[in-house]
Image: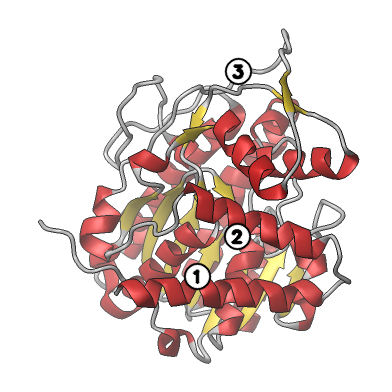
């Protein structure tokens, strides 16, 4: 099948639609909630309080824009009550323990949140009565990674040697079981999909042990960045790229149903897959300062060296493909952090909305 035209978003679809975003206090969830609010959706966010200080949630004062609830997805009764009260039509599930190195320190918490928490979201949505579409966000690390040079497609085996990767593979299996056991039934009004994105960068990520936040902290402190794996290849992409895919898929699930169910990859073009050192050097060039030094930790937990995604399915069927090159995504990211370091709490919502509009204009110019 040939590639369809590049797809933009239909803002009118989301206007006044009830949408639940789990994980809205996190980096990607915060950006997704912002975009939905800008399109006029009635957004409810549920998550634990933000872990970092500062955070995207705090700097954008998201609780002033959407209905924000602090809730643990491991608590099924509270989650179910919230869905009955808010009656979402579309659910985007992003709540997770999202850090590989932390998963070695807290394996049980990682499995409880990423596996049981996902099952709870699916069960609560199944019982709510209002839900028509569910998009479960997992990870590119859900694949059994043999360090092959080729890109992984949706048909490749799931796995993961570390607790985080394994938990995301398990979440995929749980989501597939719910889809096949319940949602694929002709009597069910629900269509569901899982989405597997590459490594995402953008303004507002302040998490521990992540490359761009660590780089920004080193720049602010005037120190060299200690880089663990400068030669590691990752599918880096700007945060709005996969979010556009999630939103496009959510719309299709809601309007056209189960033919859009199943797993989907969202990642950069192969030519934009670069090493961690190349990404950091790009940030330094855009910032106008900075340096890094290699940091070898003999007892460090294992991390994959090479990972690429095959996103042909999303390109051919959804009309999705990334539009920002390496330099452009770094500029969007660095510009956000520069502004945030001078902003008061709440100021960054307007700036983030402006970046969303700028990115959307680029999409429209290419359709």
Q: Quadrant of the C terminus?
A: bottom left
Query: What kind of element bears circle 2?
Result: helix
Mark 2 Cα-neighbour bin, 10 Å: few <14, some 14–19, many ≥20:
many
Q: Which mark is residue 332?
A: 2
The image's colouring method is: secondary structure
Mark 3 Cα-neighbour bin, 10 Å: few <14, some 14–19, many ≥20:
few
Query: What kind of element bears circle 1?
Result: helix
How far is disc 1 from disc 3 in space, using C-alphas?
Answer: 36 Å
Sequence-earlier tag: 3 or 2? 3
Q: Is residue 287 above or below residue 341?
A: above
What residue sits right under mark 1 in the picture?
359
Do the residues under discs 1 and 2 have CB atoms within 8 angstroms? yes
What residue sits right under mark 3 in the picture?
302
Q: Is 120 displayed left or right of 250 in the figure?
A: right
Residue at 72% from the left image edge and 32% from the top image edge: 102
Question: x, y percentage for residue 91?
Answer: 51, 70
Residue at 80% from the left image edge and 63% from the top image edge: 340
Query: What kind of element bears circle 3?
Result: loop
Question: x, y percentage for residue 56?
Answer: 75, 62
| Residue 352 seen anywhere in this rendered image of the structure | yes
Mark 1 Cα-neighbour bin, 10 Å: few <14, some 14–19, many ≥20:
some
Q: Is residue 85 above or below residue 114?
A: below
Question: x, y percentage for residue 239?
Answer: 55, 57
| Residue 71 seen anywhere in this rendered image of the structure | no
Outermost residue, left direction?
1
Sequence-earlier tag: 1 or 3? 3
Tag in front: 3 or 2:
2
How far is disc 1 from disc 2 in space, using C-alphas?
Answer: 9 Å
Residue at 68% from the left image edge and 60% from the top image edge: 335
How far is disc 3 from disc 2 in space, using C-alphas?
Answer: 31 Å
Sequence-earlier tag: 1 or 2? 2
Question: x, y percentage for residue 264?
Answer: 35, 52
């Amino acid at each position: 099948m040939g590639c369809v035209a590049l797809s933009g978003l239909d803002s009118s679809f989301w206007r006044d639609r009830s949408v639940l975003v789990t994980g809205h206090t996190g980096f990607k969830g915060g950006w997704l909630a912002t975009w939905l609010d800008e399109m006029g959706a009635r957004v409810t966010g549920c998550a634990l309080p933000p872990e970092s200080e500062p955070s995207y949630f705090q700097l954008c004062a998201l609780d002033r824009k959407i209905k924000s609830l602090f809730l643990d997805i491991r608590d099924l009764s509270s989650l179910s009550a919230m869905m009955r009260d808010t009656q979402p039509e579309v659910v985007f599930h992003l709540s997770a323990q999202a850090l590989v190195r932390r998963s070695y320190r807290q394996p049980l918490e990682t499995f409880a949140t990423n596996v049981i928490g996902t099952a709870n979201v699916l069960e609560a949505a199944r019982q709510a009565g209002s839900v028509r579409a569910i998009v479960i966000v997992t990870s590119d690390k859900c694949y059994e990674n043999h360090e092959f040079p080729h890109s992984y497609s949706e048909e490749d085996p799931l796995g993961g040697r570390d607790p985080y990767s394994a938990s995301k593979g398990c979440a995929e299996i749980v989501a597939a079981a719910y889809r096949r056991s319940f949602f694929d039934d002709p009597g069910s009004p629900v269509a569901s999909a899982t989405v597997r994105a590459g490594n995402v960068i953008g303004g507002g990520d302040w998490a521990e042990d992540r490359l761009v936040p660590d780089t920004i902290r080193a720049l602010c402190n005037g120190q060299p960045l200690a880089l663990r794996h400068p030669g590691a290849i990752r599918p880096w992409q700007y945060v709005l790229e996969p979010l556009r895919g999630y939103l496009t898929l959510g719309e299709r699930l809601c309007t056209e149903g189960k033919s859009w169910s199943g797993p989907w990859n969202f990642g950069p073009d192969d030519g934009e897959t670069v090493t961690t050192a190349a990404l950091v050097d790009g940030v330094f060039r855009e910032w106008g300062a900075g340096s890094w030094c290699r940091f070898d930790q003999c007892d460090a937990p294992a991390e994959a060296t090479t990972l690429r995604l095959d996103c042909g399915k999303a390109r051919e069927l959804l009309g999705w493909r990334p539009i920002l090159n390496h330099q452009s995504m770094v500029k969007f990211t660095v510009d956000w952090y520069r502004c945030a370091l001078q902003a008061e709490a709440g100021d960054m919502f307007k700036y983030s909305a402006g970046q969303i509009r700028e990115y959307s204009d680029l999409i429209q110019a290419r359709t």
